[in-house]
Amino acid sequence: MELLSLGFWPESFIDRRTGLASPDVALVAPRQTRWVIVCSNGHAAYTAKSEAEASQAAVACPVCQVAVTPTTCLRIDKQVARSKGFGASACAASIALLS
Ligand SMILES: [Zn+2]
């Protein structure tokens, strides 16, 4: 219930119109933060779901094959993205259902 008060929504519904969902369904955050490690040549080499994961990443860039770690990368970009289903059209649909 705490996550619902933070804007989390069920991953799937039994009935979208009433909002009925299974009690054990996973909840999705309205926004998700990710850390993108950029290789020394400017390619997005790795995307981590947490800062801790980003700080321990050691990968080869999928584009130029350069070894990338937090100490050898060009930079780490912190990005906040709206989760799928939380767009403006989804909000408009929810408002339409409530009115
Ligand atoms: Zn690269």
Image (spheres, grey):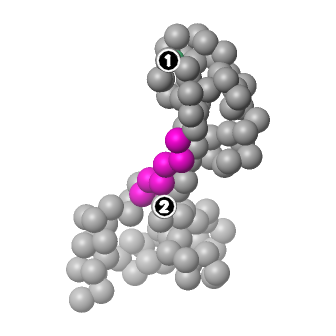
- Ligand 1 neighbours mark 1 (CB distance < 8 Å): yes
The residue segment tinted magenta is: 77-83
What's the residue type where badge 1 is placed?
A: Asn
Residue 12 percent location from the top left of the image: 49, 62
Q: Nearer the viewer, residue 48 or 22?
A: 48
Quarter of the image containing the N terminus?
A: bottom right
What's the residue type where badge 2 is placed?
A: Arg
Q: Which residue is mark 1?
A: 41
Q: Secondary structure at mark 2?
A: strand
Residue 66 percent location from the top left of the image: 61, 12
Q: Nearer the viewer, residue 73 or 81?
A: 73
Between disc 2 and disc 1, whose residue precedes?
Answer: 2
* Circle 1 Cα neighbour tier, 10 Å, few/some/many (<14 / 14–19 / ≥20): few
User: In the visual, does 49 lie left or right of 97?
Assistant: right
On whether residue 16 falls in the magenta region, the answer is: no
Q: In the image, what residue occupies the spot 33% across and 61% down?
A: 87
User: In the visual, does 46 lie left or right of 93?
Assistant: right
Q: Secondary structure at mark 1?
A: loop
Q: Main secondary structure of the magenta part?
A: strand
Q: Which residue is mark 2?
A: 31
